[in-house]
Image (cartoon, helix red, strand yellow):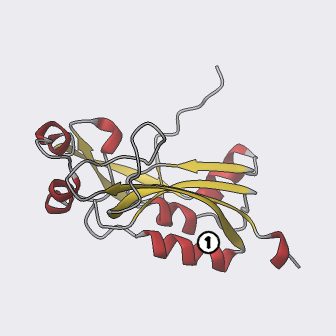
Amino acid sequence: SGYRVIEQILSDVHGVQKKLYLARKRGVSSLFKPNMNVIKYYSPENGEANIHRFDTEEEVKINTTTSSRLGKKLNINFDDIKMDTEGSELKILKGLGKQRPVFLKTEVEMVELHETQALFHDVLKFLYDLGYVMCDLNIRIRPHGGYYGFPTPTTGDFSRGVPFTGDAFFMADWMRLS
């Protein structure tokens, strides 16, 4: 039916059990503990519901694999990868091995929404060193006054504020190919 469930976590190493922090809202679950002080600061005013979606309800252990091993196991090369893994994106990228997708879209954070996670500059440097160039960036900011969101024509000018998360788009840097 178009998809296959792999009951492993992608990471930079294969065969290690990692703890997954299952959050109240499952979409913000992570390999890293939520950094509640940072989350509270970047939540909108009166954002208790937003804060509590990060509360850890359960911790489970799951085996890891790398994207390189997964590609070999499935006999595929990844052309395009999209990641939103709540802080573990750099670990997954480090597991690429010889895989070189043409395009990568990854969530990036400018602050530690999860404890000890890699930040935007870490991902940017790693991918640049692999031969990628950033071709687009959508950032979410916390403007002065508390509201947060993406700048759009309907919400006005959010060019002033503190950036904290976003999506970065990368492609192979054709100018540096040998």
In the rendered image, residue 128, in percent from the top left (x then y), is placed at 64, 76
Tag 1 residue: 127
Quadrant for the C terminus, please: bottom right
Above or below residue 120? Residue 4 is above
Crowding at mark 1 (Cα within 10 Å: few <14, some 14-19, many 20+)? many
Q: Is residue 83 left or right of residue 38?
A: right
Above or below residue 117? Residue 151 is above
Q: Is residue 60 left or right of residue 81?
A: left
Above or below residue 31? Residue 26 is above
Q: Is residue 15 left or right of residue 28?
A: right
**Residue at 59% of width from left, 31% of height from top?**
4
Displayed quadrant of residue 25: top left
Q: How many marks?
A: 1
**Residue at 32% of width from left, 63% of height from top?**
161
- Who is closer to the viewer here, 171 or 72? 171
Q: Residue furthest top?
A: 1
In the rendered image, residue 135, in percent from the top left (x then y), is placed at 67, 62
Quadrant for the N terminus, please: top right
Q: Secondary structure at mark 1?
A: helix
Q: Is residue 132 left or right of residue 125?
A: right
In the rendered image, residue 81, in percent from the top left (x then y), is placed at 63, 50
**Residue at 47% of width from left, 75% of height from top?**
121
Callout 1 amino acid? Leu
Above or below residue 58? Residue 159 is below
In the rendered image, residue 60, in percent from the top left (x then y), is placed at 26, 46
